[in-house]
Amino acid sequence: MVKIIAQIIGFVALFISLIAYHRKDKKSIMINLVICNLFKLVHYLLLGAYSGCVTKIIAIIRDGFIIIKEKNTKLSNNVFLLFFIMLYVIAAFFTYDGILSLFPLVAALVYTLFIWNGDELVVKKTAFYCYFIWLVYNIYVFSIPEIIANFLGIISTFIAIKNYKKV
């Protein structure tokens, strides 16, 4: 029953993630991602996929911080970026369970580096490539909704990139 609930929660996260990258501004993208990551955190926890779970906890904090830092230039200091990088490295150490368990942390680290000061297009392009890394991990932990989410996310984000600034 827990696995079924995990899959349902994963499908809710899928829906939210598909909407996120079609938002017009970075703040709206980040707010959607915080909500999405809350659902994904529970999803991975129920699956016992702990590196995915810890990655989502850090992502929620990171994305919330990025929303706040957009309004306060003092928070744009790279010391905070270094803090998040260190969190991912520490998380990788504590959740290591084979090379594939590192994939979510690597994807999140790359994503963090590029979204820190990136504009909407940089955020979308980075997400596009990180979906591929997550796909491998989701196959590994057998997360059906996240495998589907990764395929749909790749397609959806590709469309969002192609439609960028065409309006």
Image (spheres, helix red, strand yellow):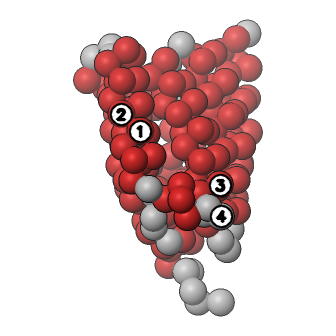
Q: Residue furthest left?
A: 99
| Neighbour tally class for label 3: few under 14, some 14-19, many 20 plus, Cα within 10 Å | some
Which sits earlier in the primary sequence, circle 1 or circle 4? Answer: 4
Which sits earlier in the primary sequence, circle 1 or circle 3? Answer: 3
Q: Nearer the viewer, residue 99 or 27?
A: 27
The reply to whether discs 1 and 4 touch (Cβ–Cβ < 8 Å) is no
Q: Which residue is mark 4?
A: 71
| Neighbour tally class for label 4: few under 14, some 14-19, many 20 plus, Cα within 10 Å | few
Q: Which residue is mark 3?
A: 68
Q: Residue furthest bottom?
A: 167
Q: Which residue is mark 2?
A: 86
Which sits earlier in the primary sequence, circle 2 or circle 3? Answer: 3
The reply to whether discs 1 and 2 touch (Cβ–Cβ < 8 Å) is yes
Q: Position of residue 49 (x, y in %)?
A: 50, 19
Q: Which residue is mark 1?
A: 83
Give the CA distance from mark 3 to mark 4. 6 Å
Q: Is residue 44 above or below residue 66?
A: above
